[in-house]
């Protein structure tokens, strides 16, 4: 591979989009001395507003580390990350938390719902935490989108895996975050339910203009992503715009062979 | 298997440590109690051994009133002529007679009586001529001659007196000035267990103690080769039958057993509190192990799939408990030694010097402490262990596996309600069934309370949610109130943290929030305070969290409930006693001044001469004194009282027959008796009544009046007669108190006049009616303090219980906390959430405890005659606030751990 994709992030896509996350030259090193592991080695990228950006790569390629750093959950050893124009790598814990509250949404592999709260309470939790009022129109729109209108009084234990993940998506959408990070959102679901979740995420991008960054192993993501980045050994080794599952399979095999 | 268990214990260091604390404190109380009481017992034993070391035979008067209360003046004195008879006995080598008094005070240079706590002020005759019988040694100066005195080194140190000084000695009359001829030591000790010693020659002592021609005791030494037993035999033959002759050994062990009876009562009292602490501790253990077992469901299931048997699982949980139990018991045992040493140092500081003996550690102390600690831990671990056994192997492969419901789950509520019912049954029968005997009554009360606590703790899991909802806003406002109160302090702390470069978060804005609310309400806008509270979301989450495992919350709360219930019980009892007593003082005493002992714990009263001196003060219109003594009435040892002067002018009673003026004219044989006493002995007006004095003399009295004692206690015992009759027949009569009426009521001038008249009586004081009532109540305060301190141990253990629960909960909810932090709760919000859950738990415990305490208190008060129920609203409010503070404090460590979790690691935690 001769092309350095990291040098021209997203340049091929629609230029009307703004930049939600701007990352430059990210390094992340774990440990010290001989045992030091470089999880990220100079990654730069722009996440464009209104895009679904997928990050793929084999285990240990640094894709989770990248996402954690972009989301402000981890700090890079060097490099900078801006979310909505704010440099986040220098913020203290409280400021960073407040930034996440406003600008970042999360979807996790294991849903991470609070078991003692109903679906409705789980969904509005981020607003409650921030002490903000719930906009009923937006709430209804989100709930309708995730098809949970009839399940709002149920607790997570009374919901199926797919329904739980839809609650988690609604919880992430409710604050209209600048960027939504999804960490293996289909990883804990069967294939059909996983497909539904991917469709739902795609729909959020299409109809709500939600910016999404998704780390996944699921090749079906190709059909919904605006852009797929491939990480290998802490670097972006390949980028595919609007691609197909077959191309992704091929790309993964290529990276694996390297 | 055991190795796995032990390794598990090490990896769960913090929780093992915290669990152990629950047992350590209880065991520490047990071992501390034993060491302390054994040491004190031993001190007294060796003291008496020393006193009677050279005595082969000891002769005293024989009392017909047995020495239940170990009061003084009960053993009657006898004629001096006995001494000659003793000396005339063939095998007597030497004999010495003496007199003594337990109310012979030394007056310091400041004019005040030297005293320490409740220790007596001893005075006695010293006979240095027979070295075998002399237990004291001269430190400086010389032995006392006529009208001279020697005092102990301890008192000399306190007063600064030196041999040759003129010092004041107070017995029954005004202060007598005497020359201090020397300073003495008792064996190696400067003084005897805090008592003051004053020694005189026999004639002076006899005159001082009003024993002219009489002796209190004779000590005899046998000729060489004659055994003490033989000497006693000979003496018994030679002496009148109304004298008691014992060997020195017998006398020493009798004295020892008298004191050790009191000490063992004290020991049981302390052990009861250790028991309560261990009971609370067992709740903490059950809860901790239950949570641990629930968290290790996967681990147990995996062990089962790998071929571990149910028995091995059971064993692994029990071994964990045993290891914790043993380690905790050993720590508790050793800490108990420290506790005992600390208390002895404290006694020494307070002037109660114990003889310089080593700490006494009986094998029993070690065995009981260890066995009880380990057994309690083991019993507490059975329940969690049985639950662990029920984990099926399949749970190993399930995500989020939970413990299967316990076998008894279905019977939980009815079973626990049955326990509560049984508990109340035992409690009520203990309280209201007559003739059970003290032992059985105490067992019934204890078992009843125990069953109720256990039952309520189990059933509480069912009602945790509604109670939590009810107390949550109380907790919120209490926290706002408290953090507002300490805001200036938090602000200073923040400034300080800036100064040392470790930036803390700015303290919460509560004062400003409250101010804003006040301003808005002043403008008539009436905003709801709750609308101003930021972070209601965190409180709501905390509330929801508290209901997630109701058993856990209930169990932690129940541990606190026990301490709270007992503290409330004490508060209710004391409030009821004080309330009733105040009522009684108001209704009984119509005088406006009282003369009382300066040392409120004094059992010997004040000289009768003091009231005679005061009676001469111009303006005194009426005066009456009350004396007390012990006598045999209807075959039982009873307290009797006597009055002099004009009681009708200063006392007011309700009468069945007779009136106040009956008291004025009792004459030589008249007596008034209480209503209840009259009923139980079928006494009517003019019924004959025989009172036998300690010396064995029968007083034939006649009932002249029957009174009804008011609620709050009577000023008089069941039988009251004239002071004239009393003084003629009882040894060492003294006033317990004197009441008087002065012209012009209480005034500066009157108080001054009384103080002046009492100048010669430093152990007596004049109090106004109000001071008198307050002082009587104040004497309750030290007892209250002791009870509260002892119960504080239990509360401390339940505090640790809440900490452990929260630590384990935080650990269990790690991933969830990671998620919450990721979606935007700050560290401070995390802390608030944990803190509120803690406050809710503590308030649940506090609320249940206060409620139970009120019920217990009401039941107990209804059983005590003369006392009516009073609710101590202020104290209960304070206890609720204390519960909140306990909640806040318990959350500090777990909340910090939760807030400092690394978000990423927490999210990936399994």
Image (cartoon, coloured by chain):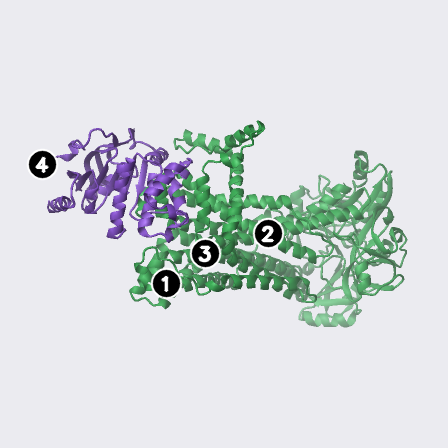
Percent across and percent down for residue B296 are: 36, 57
- Chain to which mark 1 belongs: B
Q: Nearer the viewer, residue B158 or B537?
A: B537
Indicate left or right for B744 with B599 as reference. right
Q: Are marks 2 and 4 in contact (CB under 8 Å)?
A: no
- Which residue corresponds to the image point at 37% horizontal and 55% vertical from the top-left? B295
Colour used to depict chain A in the structure image: purple
Near mark 4 (Cα within 10 A), the count class, few <14, some 14-19 or many ≥20, is few
Q: Secondary structure at mark 1?
A: loop
Q: How many marks?
A: 4
**Label 4 sits on residue:** A2
Q: Is residue B579 left or right of residue A212?
A: right
Q: Earlier in the sequence, mark 3 or mark 2?
A: 3
- The answer to whether residue B196 is visible is no
Q: In the depicted view, which residue is nearer to us: B772 or B840?
A: B840
Q: Is residue A178 above or below residue B390?
A: above
**Distance (Cα) linking label 4 and label 3:** 63 Å
What percent of the width, then of the height, locates residue B788?
A: 59, 49
Q: Which chain is green?
A: B
Q: Earlier in the sequence, mark 1 or mark 2?
A: 1
10 Å neighbourhood of mark 3: few (<14), some, or many (≥20)? many
Q: Which residue is mark 2?
A: B851
**CA distance separating discs 1 and 2:** 38 Å
Q: Are marks 4 and 3 in contact (CB under 8 Å)?
A: no
Q: Give the label, 3 or 1, closer to the camera.
A: 1
Residue identified by numbered label 3: B287
Q: Which mark is residue B391?
A: 1
Kindly give the residue lying farthest to the left in the view shown.
A2
């Amino acid at each position: 591979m001769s092309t350095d994709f990291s040098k021209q992030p997203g340049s091929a896509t629609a230029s009307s989009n703004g930049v939600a996350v701007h990352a430059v030259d990210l390094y992340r090193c774990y440990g010290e001395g001989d045992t030091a592991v470089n999880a990220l080695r100079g990654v730069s990228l722009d996440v464009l507003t209104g895009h679904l950006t997928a990050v793929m790569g084999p285990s240990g390629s640094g894709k989770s580390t990248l996402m954690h750093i972009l989301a402000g959950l981890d700090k890079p050893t060097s490099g900078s990350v801006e979310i909505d124009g704010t440099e986040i790598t220098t913020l203290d814990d409280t400021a960073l938390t407040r930034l996440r509250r406003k600008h970042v949404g999360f979807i996790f592999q294991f849903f991470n719902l609070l078991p003692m709260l109903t679906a409705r309470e789980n969904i509005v939790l981020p607003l409650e935490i921030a002490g903000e009022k719930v906009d009923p129109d937006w709430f209804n729109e989100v709930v309708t989108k995730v098809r949970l209108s009839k399940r709002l009084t149920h607790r997570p234990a009374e919901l199926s895996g797919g329904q739980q993940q839809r609650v988690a998506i609604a919880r992430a959408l409710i604050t209209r975050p600048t960027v939504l990070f999804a960490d293996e959102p289909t990883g804990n679901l069967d294939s059909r339910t996983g497909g539904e979740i991917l469709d739902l995420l795609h729909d959020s991008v299409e109809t709500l203009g939600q910016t999404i960054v998704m780390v996944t192993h699921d090749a079906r993501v190709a059909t919904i992503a605006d852009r797929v980045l491939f990480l290998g050994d802490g670097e972006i080794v390949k980028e595919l715009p609007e691609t197909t599952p077959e191309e992704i399979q091929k790309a993964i095999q290529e990276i694996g062979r390297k | 298997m055991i190795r796995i268990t032990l390794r598990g214990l090490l990896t769960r260091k913090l929780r093992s440590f915290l669990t152990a604390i629950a047992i350590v404190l209880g065991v520490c109380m047990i071992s501390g109690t034993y060491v302390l009481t054994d040491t004190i017992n031993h001190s007294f034993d060796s003291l008496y051994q020393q006193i009677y070391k050279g005595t082969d035979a000891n002769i005293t008067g024989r009392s017909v009133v047995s020495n239940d209360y170990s009061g003084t003046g009960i053993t009657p004195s006898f004629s001096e002529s006995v001494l000659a008879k003793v000396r005339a006995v063939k095998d007597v080598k030497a004999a010495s007679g003496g007199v003594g008094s337990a109310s012979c005070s030394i007056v310091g240079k400041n004019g005040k009586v030297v005293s320490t706590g409740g220790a007596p002020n001893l005075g006695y005759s010293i006979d240095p001529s027979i070295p075998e019988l002399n237990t004291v040694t001269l430190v400086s100066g010389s032995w006392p001659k006529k009208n001279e005195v020697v005092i102990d080194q301890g008192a000399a140190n306190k007063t600064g007196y030196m041999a040759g000084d003129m010092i004041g000695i107070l017995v029954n009359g005004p202060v007598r000035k005497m020359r201090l001829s020397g300073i003495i030591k008792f064996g190696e000790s400067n003084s005897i267990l805090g008592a003051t010693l004053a020694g005189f020659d026999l004639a002076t002592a006899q005159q001082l103690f009003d024993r002219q021609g009489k002796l209190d005791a004779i000590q005899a030494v046998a000729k060489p080769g004659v055994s003490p037993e033989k000497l006693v035999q000979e003496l018994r033959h030679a002496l009148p039958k109304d004298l008691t002759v014992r060997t020195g050994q017998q006398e020493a062990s009798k004295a020892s057993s008298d004191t050790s009876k009191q000490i063992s009562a004290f020991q049981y009292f302390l052990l009861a509190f250790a028991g309560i602490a261990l009971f609370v501790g067992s709740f903490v253990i059950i809860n901790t192990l239950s949570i641990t077992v629930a968290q290790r469901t996967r681990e147990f299931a995996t062990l089962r799939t790998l071929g571990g048997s149910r028995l091995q699982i059971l064993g692994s949980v029990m071994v964990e408990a045993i290891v914790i139990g043993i380690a905790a018991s050993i720590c508790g045992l050793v800490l108990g030694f420290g506790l005992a040493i600390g208390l002895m140092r404290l006694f020494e500081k307070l002037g109660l010097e114990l003889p310089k003996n080593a700490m006494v550690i009986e094998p029993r102390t070690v065995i009981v402490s260890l066995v009880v600690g380990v057994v309690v831990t083991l019993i507490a671990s059975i329940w969690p262990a049985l639950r662990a056994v029920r984990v099926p192997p399949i749970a190993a492969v399930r995500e989020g596996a939970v413990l299967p419901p316990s076998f008894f789950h279905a019977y939980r509520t009815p079973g626990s309600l049955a326990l509560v019912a049984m508990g109340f049954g035992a409690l009520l029968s203990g309280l209201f069934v007559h003739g059970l005997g003290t032992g059985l009554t105490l067992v019934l009360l204890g078992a009843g309370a125990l069953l109720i606590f256990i039952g309520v703790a189990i059933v509480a899991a069912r009602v945790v949610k509604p109670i939590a909802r009810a107390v949550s806003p109380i907790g919120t406002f209490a926290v706002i109130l408290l953090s507002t109160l300490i805001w200036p302090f938090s602000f200073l702390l923040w400034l300080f943290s800036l100064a040392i470069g470790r930036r803390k978060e700015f303290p919460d804005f509560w004062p400003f929030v409250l101010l804003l609310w006040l301003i808005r309400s002043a403008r008539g806008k009436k905003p709801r305070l709750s609308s101003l509270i930021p972070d209601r979301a965190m409180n709501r989450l905390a509330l929801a969290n508290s209901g997630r495992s109701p058993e856990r919350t209930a169990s932690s709360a129940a541990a606190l409930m026990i301490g709270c219930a007992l503290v409330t019980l004490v508060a209710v009892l004391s409030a009821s006693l004080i309330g009733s007593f105040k009522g009684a003082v108001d209704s009984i005493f119509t005088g406006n001044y009282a003369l009382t002992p300066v040392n409120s714990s004094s059992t010997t009263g004040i000289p009768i001469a003091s009231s005679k001196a005061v009676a001469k003060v111009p303006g005194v219109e009426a005066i009456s004194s009350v004396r007390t003594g012990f006598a045999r009435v209807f075959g039982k040892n009873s307290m009797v009282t006597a009055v002099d002067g004009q009681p009708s002018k200063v006392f007011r009673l309700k009468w069945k027959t007779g009136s106040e003026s009956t008291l004025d004219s009792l004459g030589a044989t008249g007596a008034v008796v209480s209503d209840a006493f009259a009923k139980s002995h079928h006494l009517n007006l003019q019924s004959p009544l025989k009172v036998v004095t300690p010396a064995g003399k029968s007083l034939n009295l006649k009932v002249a009046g029957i009174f009804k004692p008011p609620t709050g206690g009577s000023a008089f015992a069941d039988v009251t007669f004239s002071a004239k009759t009393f003084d003629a027949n009882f040894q060492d009569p003294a006033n317990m108190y004197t009441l008087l009426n002065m012209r012009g009521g209480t005034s500066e001038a009157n108080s001054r006049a009384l103080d002046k008249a009492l100048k010669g009586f430093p152990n007596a004081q004049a109090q106004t009616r109000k001071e008198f009532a307050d002082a009587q109540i104040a004497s309750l305060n030290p007892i209250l303090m002791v009870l509260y301190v002892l119960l504080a141990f239990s509360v401390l253990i339940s505090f640790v219980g809440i900490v452990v629960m929260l630590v384990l909960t935080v650990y269990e909810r790690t991933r969830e906390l990671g998620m919450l932090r990721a979606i935007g709760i700050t560290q401070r919000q995390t802390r608030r959430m944990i803190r509120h859950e803690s406050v809710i738990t503590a308030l649940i415990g506090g609320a249940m405890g206060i409620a139970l305490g009120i019920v217990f208190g009401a039941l107990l008060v209804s059983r005590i005659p003369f006392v009516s129920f009073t609710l101590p609203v202020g104290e209960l409010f304070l206890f609720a606030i204390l519960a909140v503070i306990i909640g806040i404090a318990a959350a500090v460590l777990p909340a910090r751990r939760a807030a400092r979790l690394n978000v990423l690691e927490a999210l990936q935690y399994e």
